[in-house]
Amino acid sequence: MSLKIFLFACMVFALTLNEVVSQAPPAEFRVKQPRGFEVSIPADPDIELFAFHGKLNEPMDGLEAGMWSADITRRKNGRFTFTDRATKLKRGDVIYFWTYVLRDGRGFRQDNGEFHV
C-alpha cells in the first residue's frame, strides 16, 4: 500500500472517530407520576453543561427557547438532569426538543428531537 493511501485512510479513520466521540449524548426521558418528567444525559467528566429546550405537542421552530429552557451545570447521581414537576403528560403527547452539550470547551447539539409519551 502506498504511503499516500495509508495516510488518507488514517485521516478518514481519525475524522470518523472524532465525529462519533464529538456528538451530544442522546437525551433520555422519564415520565413521572402523577405529573412531571425528567430529561437527562450521563455526566461524563468532560461535559461542563447540558441545555434542554422543548415544547409540548408543537414542533420547535429551529433553535427557539421553547416552553422549557434550562442550562444544567450540576451533576446529580451521575447525570445532568432537567426536571419538570408540573406538566401532566398523557399517552399520545409529544415533547419536541433540542439539546446542547458543552464538552471540553466545544458545543454539540441534538436537533429535531421527539419524545412520544
Image: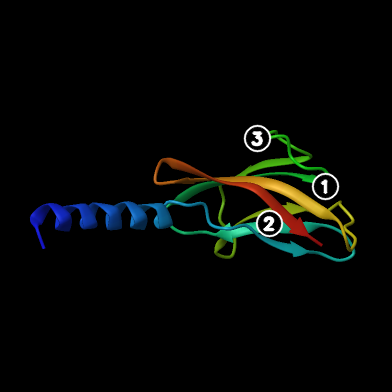
Q: Which one is in front, 73 or 41?
A: 41
Q: Alpha-carbon distance for marks 1 and 2?
A: 14 Å
At x 12% / y 52%, what residue is drawn? 4
- Mark 2 residue element: strand
Residue where numbered disc 3 is placed? 63
Mark with earlier residue (1, 3) = 1
Q: What amino acid is at disc 3? A: Leu
Q: Which one is in front, 115 or 73?
A: 115
Mark 3 in CB contact with mark 2 (< 8 angstroms): no
- Mark 1 residue element: strand
Residue where numbered disc 2 is placed? 39
Residue 83 occupies quadrant: bottom right
Q: How many marks?
A: 3
The x, y position of residue 106, in whole percent, is 42, 41
Mark with earlier residue (3, 2) = 2
Q: What amino acid is at disc 2? A: Val
Q: What is the crowding at mark 1: few (fewer than 14 residues within 10 Å), some, or many (at least 20)?
A: some
The x, y position of residue 66, in whole percent, is 75, 37
Quarter containing the C terminus: bottom right
At x 74% / y 39%, what residue is drawn? 60
Q: Nearer the viewer, mark 1 or mark 2?
A: 1
Asked if residue 51 can be seen in this view, the reply is: no
- Mark 3 residue element: loop
Residue where numbered disc 1 is placed? 56
77 left or right of 116 in image: left
Q: What is the crowding at mark 3: few (fewer than 14 residues within 10 Å), some, or many (at least 20)?
A: few
Q: What amino acid is at disc 1? A: Leu
**Figure check: 26 above or below 50:** below
At x 62% / y 57%, what residue is drawn? 27
